[in-house]
Amino acid sequence: MFEKYQVPALFLAKNAVLTSFASGRATSLVVDCGGGSTTVAPVHDGYVLQKAFTTSPIGGEFLTDCLLKSLEHKGISIKPRYAFKRKEVRPGEFQVVDLDCPNTTESYKLYCQRVIVGDIKECVCRAPDTPYDDTSYSNIPMTPYELPDGQTIEIGADRFKIPDVLFNPSLVHTIPGMEGSAEMASSARGLPQMVIDSINKCDVDIRRELFSSILLAGGTASMQQLKERIEKDLLEESPQAARVKVLASGNATERRFSVWIGGSILASLGSFQQMWFSKSEFEEHGASYIQRKCP
């Protein structure tokens, strides 16, 4: 950065610390449900406790893949937006005309399908109140969803099954087409277990405070009923003396961009000017000095 881009100064901050700042807390347990992974990081007085950091490969994109495979298994084909156009025949009535796009790659087609399935997930999926099992959810009412090509599909038990993979990764074994990810899922832990494992790795003195300030962040954290389900599971599994409190911004956009918001708050503080790692310090002490300036 200093040698190639000639920046005068920089500062590196950890995601969990910025999320904590965004909620106005210096100590908290940050549960970041992102696209590619889910991480649990305890923050104490503005520092991440690395020894208690836990991560899982199951994130929003993995859930999207699960839903896509499940829909394909049911014979529902998701047409990418570039593969058709809708022509208005008469007011309010549309005709779908297929378009030929011979030079489109398979990876781009999959990307476009995942964008649509991602929207289905955000619109109709919700975390179940209790652990998912096929018997309890077999008669669940179907929820309609209109695809971009005008086709309306009905989604039933998958609305609850897919989000429950976050809590019980072994459910992946029951989703057709996800056999390749079964080994990864079997080594992953559920969200409540990750939280408890992370807190148990911290000093006894701060465990109570961490239980009472669990922060949800990331795009996947905006899923309906996720906050309530995590709180319910933790109340069952945590020590009796712990007061479990899961906090999440009411605004889905704030949850998704909490790291950026925290960075904005940090950079606007008057004391931030002394925190920069400047070019002159880099020239004097070398690159390793950043470990001291940006812990």
Image (cartoon, helix red, strand yellow):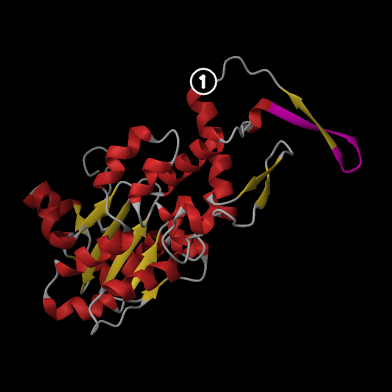
In the image, residue 102 sits, relative to residue 279, either above or below, namely above
- Which stretch appears magenta? 84-93
Tell whether 153 sits left or right of 274.
right
Q: Residue at x 67, y 41 (%)?
A: 147
Q: Residue at x 53, y 45 (%)?
A: 118
182 falls in the magenta region: no
Residue 145 visible somewhere in the drawing: yes
In the rendered image, residue 156, in percent from the top left (x then y), is placed at 59, 51
**Nearer-the-camera pick, 261 or 275:** 261
**Nearer-the-camera pick, 170 or 43:** 170
Displayed quadrant of residue 47: bottom left
Q: Residue at x 30, y 65 (%)?
A: 30
Tally the marks.
1
- Dot 1: element: loop
Residue 265 visible somewhere in the drawing: no
Q: Identify the residue under disc 1.
A: 105
In the rendered image, residue 86, in percent from the top left (x then y), is placed at 78, 33
Displayed quadrant of residue 219: bottom left
Displayed quadrant of residue 191: bottom left
In the image, residue 3 sits, relative to residue 295, either above or below, namely above
In the image, residue 55 sits, relative to residue 95, either above or below, namely below
**Please, what is the three-letter code of the amino acid marked with disc 1?**
Thr
Q: In the picture, which quadrant includes the N terminus? A: top left
